[in-house]
Image (cartoon, rainbow, N blue to C red):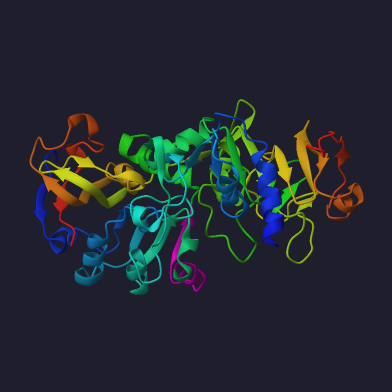
Amino acid sequence: MTVARGPVEPEEAVSAIRSGDTVMVGGFGLVGAPLTLIDALVETSDADELTIVSNNIGEPGRGLGKLLREGRIKRGISSYFTSNPEAVAAVNSGDMEATLVPQGTFAEAIRAAGAGIAGFLTPVGAGTLLAEGKEEHVVGGVPHVLERPIHADVALVYAARGDELGNLWYRHTARNFNPLMATAARVTIAEVGEIVPIGGLDPESIHTPHLYVDQLVWPR
Amino acid sequence: MTSDVKHLIAGRAVQELRPGEIVNLGIGIPNLVPGLLGDDASVFLHTENGLLGVGPRPGEDELDPDLIDAAKQPVTALAGAAYFDSAQSFAMIRGGHVDVAVLGALQVSIAGDIANWAVPGKDVLGVGGAMDLVVGARRVIVTMTATSSSGEPKVVAECTYPLTARGAADVVITELSVFRLRDGALVLTELLGDATVEQVLAATGAPFDIDLEDRRAA
């Protein structure tokens, strides 16, 4: 899709998420996380058995931590589960599967998915626990790990500002994984702090061009 | 570990930094570095969550909910700062554009292997940017106490904790001494404070070469 629909109510937007889906969620901790969309997913959707791709699984009872408490996350793909002790407990009790990925590999794998790259070789993680089960290739005498892209069915992102076409602008360190995730899912839903008319964003400063964005949602 | 010990280690790490360098700081002792840099510090601090040009902690009236560091604590951005997404941030790290990473560790082997992200059977669910940083930064400075809270040496023959990367440490600074990686092995190059070689030997779990530089007076 080339033009975003909306803005619509967050409940309508998250109805695109089905049980068993893989859902990417932006944010570093709660900064840059689409909290309105997460709340709508928790409160109005009954999708479960979800695979969540997010740097963290929220905090206890906050952000994705709410979805975790409802037992609707089957698997988490993250670089740092530890920031939510309840996520660690859920993994240890077998209630959630965990795939731990070095943060730079996590970011690059999402970027690769959006950019049509089938895999990449990185020296990061070679010879460690996190390379187990992955192909290793020695390049120039240095061991590298073959990493695959991380795709999703739906991406939930947060941008401080967007226009009615779906062009997005992020603010400060709230950018983090959001522009990457916006490229890597079949459906991208953007929660936007302020929606301006077409032409209201400086084309030189747009971080995510609108062709990546399918749906706009106001925050609450 | 007393605050004095932490400040001693962090203060010695500051002396390793050169003007103009791009520096990434880990959690723990490295977090003391900004406060010890002094007003005329000319290094640029990089944080993995997307900021080059990290400034001091904000006052209450300067708090910005969109502005944090990798420890998820509020920071400010200096004049000349730049924001970027996480893929670019790690391209900077992995691509060798970050000059120095200062980070803590649980163990460092005599060959420079670093274990700093997991305790076996206890905590293997948070790696963050640790592996990217030790592989990608041009110089890796490890800041840690010489022994663990239970008295076990942290410089060891072989890491028994899960590895972060092999041969990645360039400098290891404890409250007792400085080690440098030379030809694939750590060498004791400096004693700190009143420490003696005997104390360093007793606090180290592996044999090492000694080549002391005469800088204790400095």
Q: Residue at x 44, y 55 (%)?
A: A78
Give the camera-side residue of B42 and A201.
B42
Quarter of the figure with residue A36: bottom left
Q: Quadrant of the N terminus of chain B?
A: bottom right
Left or right of residue B43: residue A127:
right
Q: Is residue A161 magenta?
A: no
Q: Point out the residue furthest to the right here.
A: B198
Give the camera-side residue of B48 and B64.
B64
Residue A87 in the image: above or below residue B198 = below
Give the camera-side residue of A210 and B8.
B8
Q: Quadrant of the C terminus of chain B?
A: top right
Residue B59 in the image: above or below residue A91 = above
Residue B109 image position (x, y, % from top left): 75, 47
Residue B45 image position (x, y, % from top left): 50, 39
Residue A170 image position (x, y, % from top left): 27, 44
Left or right of residue B77: residue B110:
right
Q: Is residue A90 magenta?
A: yes
Res A132 visible: no
Quarter of the figure with residue B60: bottom left
Q: How many labels, in total?
A: 0
Residue A2 in the image: above or below residue A204 = below
Residue B104 image position (x, y, % from top left): 64, 51
Q: Point out the residue furthest to the top here.
A: A140
Q: Residue at x 37, y 38 (%)?
A: B84
Left or right of residue B200: residue B83:
left
Q: Residue at x 55, y 46 (%)?
A: B34
Res A24 visible: yes
Q: Which residues are magenta?
A: A87-100
